């Protein structure tokens, strides 16, 4: 299949921290010319059947999707899974365990925010949650914007929700090996999401790519909403260096918050192997 495909293999619905339903996302993707789509909610595959049905209705090809939270070198890394069996019990149980600590973490975040004068953040964030098992920092950010504490979500993350700030609670997610294995055991391909967003040293980044490959990971996001054009080039080179395929996805969350719309990305460089070439028999 051509690298010049309008594939969008990374976005979020109300089933995690997006603001649109799987159906509304499918309509928006189709309207924006997406030809191959995947819904990749954080640590959750509860929206997959709806996304697939909506994709079919619009004549879009579909790959099952998820974005798994992983702890690597004391930071959170995201691993996108594509084309796996969404009913495989190893995936279903693994994700359920990964989601498990979010409620407690959210209460601790709220306690810390109360100490800096922000009351009721847990209850406030809950108003924005679509899936009670998936309360995330994004929901806190929406509450803090809605209640006038900050002007937008990026200010909330900068002032409150990132490492060293008053509302940040460190959390232990899945291991890299676990996440890659849940995806690959179910016939899918594991993808390092938005590598340009991590604050790794060159050595740590090298370790991430090498260990990911050793565990069976096969692709990296090269063209994605949070990458600069320079990063399209540098991570394209990394893909070639490590023998990884390349993925493309907007990471769209919300019409009000996301800078990159569904499908609105440059094409992959044709010298890269597109991840959909590895997944030809998994496309639905
Ligand atoms: P969590 O999984 O609860 O740690 O929340 C992570 C989510 O927060 C990410 O998937 C993004 O949607 C969002 N996020 C992280 N950093 C930022 C940022 N600087 N600005 C806006 N949203 C962010
Ligand atoms: Mn998110
Ligand atoms: Mn992510
Ligand atoms: Mn994402």
Image (cartoon, grey):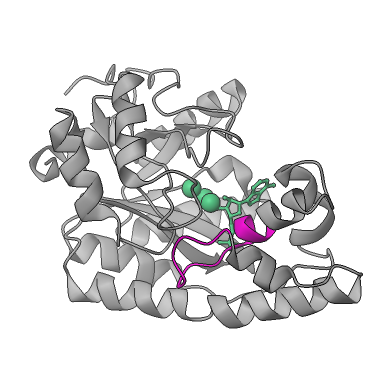
User: Would you say 229 lies left or right of 246 here?
Assistant: right
Q: Position of residue 79 (x, y in %)?
A: 42, 55
User: Would you say 170 lies left or right of 172 here?
Assistant: right
Residue shown at 73% from the left, 50% from the top:
146
Q: Is residue 82 visible?
A: yes
Residue shown at 36% from the left, 37% from the top:
25
User: Would you say 260 lies left or right of 64 here?
Assistant: right
Say which of 122 and 226 sits in front: 122
Q: Position of residue 56 (x, y in %)?
A: 13, 36
Q: Position of residue 173 (x, y in %)?
A: 51, 73
Query: In the picture, residue 112 is in which quadrant?
Result: bottom right
Q: Is residue 233 magenta?
A: no
Q: Position of residue 99 (x, y in %)?
A: 45, 74
Residue shown at 47% from the left, 30% from the top:
237
Among all residues in the image, which is located at the extreme left?
281
The magenta span reads: 128-140
Say which of 161 and 187 sits in front: 161
The quarter of the image holding the C terminus is top left
Most common SS among magenta residues? loop
User: Would you say 268 lies left or right of 189 here?
Assistant: right
Q: Is residue 162 visible?
A: no
């Amino acid at each position: 299949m051509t690298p010049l495909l309008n594939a969008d293999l990374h976005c979020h619905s109300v089933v995690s921290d997006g603001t649109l339903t799987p159906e509304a996302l499918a309509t928006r993707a189709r309207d924006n010319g997406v030809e191959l789509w995947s819904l990749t909610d954080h640590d959750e595959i509860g929206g997959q059947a709806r996304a697939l049905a909506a994709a079919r209705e619009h004549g879009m090809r579909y790959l099952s999707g998820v974005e798994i939270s992983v702890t690597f070198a004391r930071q959170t890394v995201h691993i996108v899974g594509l084309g796996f069996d969404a009913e495989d019990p190893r995936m279903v149980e693994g994700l359920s365990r990964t989601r498990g600590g979010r409620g407690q973490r959210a209460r601790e975040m709220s306690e810390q925010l109360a100490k800096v004068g922000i009351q009721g953040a847990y209850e406030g964030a809950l108003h924005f949650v679509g899936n009670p098992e998936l309360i995330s920092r994004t929901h806190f950010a929406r509450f803090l914007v809605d209640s006038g504490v900050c002007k937008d979500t990026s200010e909330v993350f900068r002032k409150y929700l990132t490492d060293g700030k008053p509302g940040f609670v460190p959390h232990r997610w899945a291991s890299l090996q676990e996440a890659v294995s849940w995806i690959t055991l179910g016939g899918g391909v594991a993808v390092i999401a938005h590598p340009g967003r991590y604050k790794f040293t060159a050595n740590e980044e090298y370790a991430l790519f090498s260990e990911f490959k050793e565990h069976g990971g096969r692709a990296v996001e090269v063209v994605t909403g949070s990458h600069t054009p320079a990063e399209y080039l540098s991570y394209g080179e990394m893909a070639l260096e490590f023998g990884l395929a390349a993925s493309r996805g907007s990471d769209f969350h919300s019409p009000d918050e996301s800078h990159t719309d569904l499908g609105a990305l440059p094409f992959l460089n044709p010298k890269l192997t597109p991840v959909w070439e590895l997944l030809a028999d998994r496309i639905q």
